[in-house]
């Protein structure tokens, strides 16, 4: 079994001083290694992991400053404590500026040394834990949460890698259920703001007055019912990222207020006198043609240009069918985790082929919902075509809502909504063309799309 005790490297060309520290640190429960000079210490640092380095400042050939620089080159978070004679205090202070954790002047009190050693090791372990948690956060919310190896998805990954380090606002465009929020989270968790908050809000979910309060906050007494102060989501996301989902549905009255915040970097709560400076990266998403909305007069052109500094287009599932087997594996694992009593452990190859032929107008979200339904409802360990026929028969049909309606009794509104989505999908996402084929106004497509979210 591996020794989990903290490992300390003591570096001193004075054998008596090194021996004293080794004895005291060993008694205190640490694993202690020694180096008789800076050159040996640097070689060991490059080959072995340590939790703390304690080094004499003045040594022949390679001194403590060299050891400090080497330690920080190997691991910037590795704490280094320096030991020096009283006359070299200025050099020790210089070392603190260069990143040393602490320094002691000789002769020192061993009790004081042990206190700072304990603190340094605790800080080191805490940083390691935080780094591991950040890694998990990136894996859960960054690229690892996005499934797909198709050319279409590789283009998305490439765009995220190039855009994530910047401060620019981003407009994520894609159909409902395609995974726009996953892209926004990947931008945040792979960028320099990953340690700060990621705050999301759906602009269709709230009426205008409540949405304004949620975004910008309010002071006490600003309006009837405002009994307390509300910070608002811009302040909640300060130094982090604010994700504005379905920005195309933002009420016209709020659009100039949002534009002002983006341009000035300040937010003023409802009823407040003084604006607050903020540092927030805004990522917006939409499933609508905002340029068409501008022509219709329902979306501000200046806000669009402020949001659309860079754009990422999320491909619909029909343009990445090669990813469906990978998505099925991922969704099956998630569904089994959420439903541990299910017997299902796999999907048959026939089911995978059938699912891959379905056009999926509801995109990735619909696919995940169907997989979970099969995991819950199927009685055997492997989902068969008979299970799909019983619990998701439209998957085995020709893909159109009309074919699905032959096997299921659907409400007329649902059938209309799905048929419109199917025609839009058949038109490659070209909504004006779909409206022409359907013989309806383009605004009807937007309204039906909104009610399906």
Image: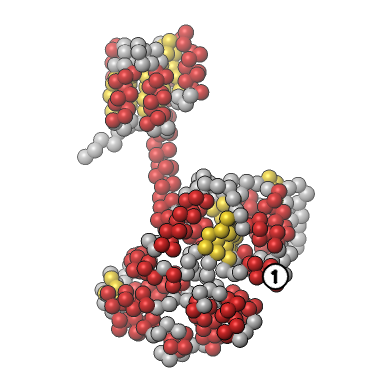
Q: Where is residue 333 in the image (x, y as percent from the top left)?
A: 34, 65
Snapshot quadrant of residue 11:
top left
In the foreground, 62 or 6: 62
The residue located at (40%, 15%) in the rendering is 57
* Residue 41, above or below 307: above
In the figure, is residue 261 to the left or right of 55?
right
* Residue 352, above or below 121: below
The residue singled out by tag 1 in the image is 295
Q: Where is residue 182 in the image (x, y as percent from the top left)?
A: 48, 60
Q: Quadrant of the C terminus?
A: bottom right
The residue located at (39%, 70%) in the rendering is 321
In the foreground, 167 or 378: 167
In the foreground, 346 or 85: 346
Does any portion of residue 435 appear in the rendered image? Answer: yes
Q: Quadrant of the N terminus?
A: top left
SS at mark 1 in the image = helix
In the figure, is residue 435 to the left or right of 23?
right
Q: Position of residue 229 (x, y in %)?
A: 69, 53
Snapshot quadrant of residue 443:
bottom right
Q: Where is residue 88 in the image (x, y as percent from the top left)?
A: 46, 11
Q: Is disc 1 surrounded by few (<14), some (14 to 19) or many (20+) residues within 10 Å?
A: few
* Residue 222, above or below 1: below
């Amino acid at each position: 079994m591996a020794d989990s005790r903290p490992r300390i490297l003591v570096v001193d060309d004075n054998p008596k001083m090194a021996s004293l520290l080794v004895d005291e640190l060993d008694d205190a429960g640490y694993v202690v290694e020694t180096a008789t000079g800076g050159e040996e210490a640097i070689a060991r640092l490059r080959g072995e992991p340590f939790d703390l380095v304690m080094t004499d400042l003045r040594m022949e050939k390679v001194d403590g400053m060299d050891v400090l620089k080497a330690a920080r080159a190997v691991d910037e978070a590795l704490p280094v404590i320096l030991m020096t004679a009283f006359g070299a205090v200025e050099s020790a202070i210089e070392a603190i500026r260069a990143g040393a954790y602490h320094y002691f002047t000789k002769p020192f009190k061993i009790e004081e040394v042990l206190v700072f050693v304990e603190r340094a090791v605790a800080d080191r372990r805490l940083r390691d834990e935080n780094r591991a948690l950040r890694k998990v956060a990136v894996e859960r919310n960054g690229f690892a949460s996005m499934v797909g190896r198709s050319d279409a998805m590789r283009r998305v990954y490439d765009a995220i890698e190039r855009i994530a380090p910047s401060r620019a606002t981003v407009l994520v465009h894609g159909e409902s259920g395609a995974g726009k929020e996953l892209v926004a989270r990947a931008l945040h968790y792979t960028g320099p703001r990953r340690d700060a908050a990621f705050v999301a809000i759906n602009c269709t979910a709230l009426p205008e007055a409540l949405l304004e309060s949620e975004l910008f906050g309010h002071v006490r007494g600003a309006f009837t019912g405002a009994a307390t102060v509300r910070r608002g989501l811009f302040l909640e996301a300060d130094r982090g990222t604010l994700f504005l989902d379905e920005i195309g549905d933002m009420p016209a009255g709020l659009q100039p207020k949002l534009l002002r915040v983006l341009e000035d970097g300040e937010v003023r709560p409802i009823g407040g006198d003084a604006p607050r400076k903020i540092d927030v990266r805004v990522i917006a998403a939409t499933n609508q043609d905002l340029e068409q909305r501008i022509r219709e007069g329902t979306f501000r052109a200046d806000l669009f240009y402020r949001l659309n500094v860079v754009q990422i287009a999320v491909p619909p599932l029909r343009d990445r069918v090669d990813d469906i087997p990978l998505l099925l594996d991922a969704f099956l694992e998630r569904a089994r985790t959420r439903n541990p009593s299910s017997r299902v452990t796999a999907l048959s190859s026939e089911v995978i082929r059938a699912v891959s032929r379905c056009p999926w107008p509801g995109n990735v979200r619909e696919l995940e919902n169907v997989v979970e339904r099969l995991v819950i409802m199927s009685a055997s360990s492997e989902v068969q075509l008979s299970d799909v026929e019983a619990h998701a028969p439209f998957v085995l049909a020709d893909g159109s809502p009309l074919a699905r309606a032959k096997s299921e009794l659907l409400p007329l509104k649902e059938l209309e909504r799905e048929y419109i989505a199917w025609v839009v999908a058949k038109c490659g996402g070209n909504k004006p063309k779909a409206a022409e084929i359907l013989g309806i106004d383009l605004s009807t497509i937007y309204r039906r799309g909104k009610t399906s979210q």
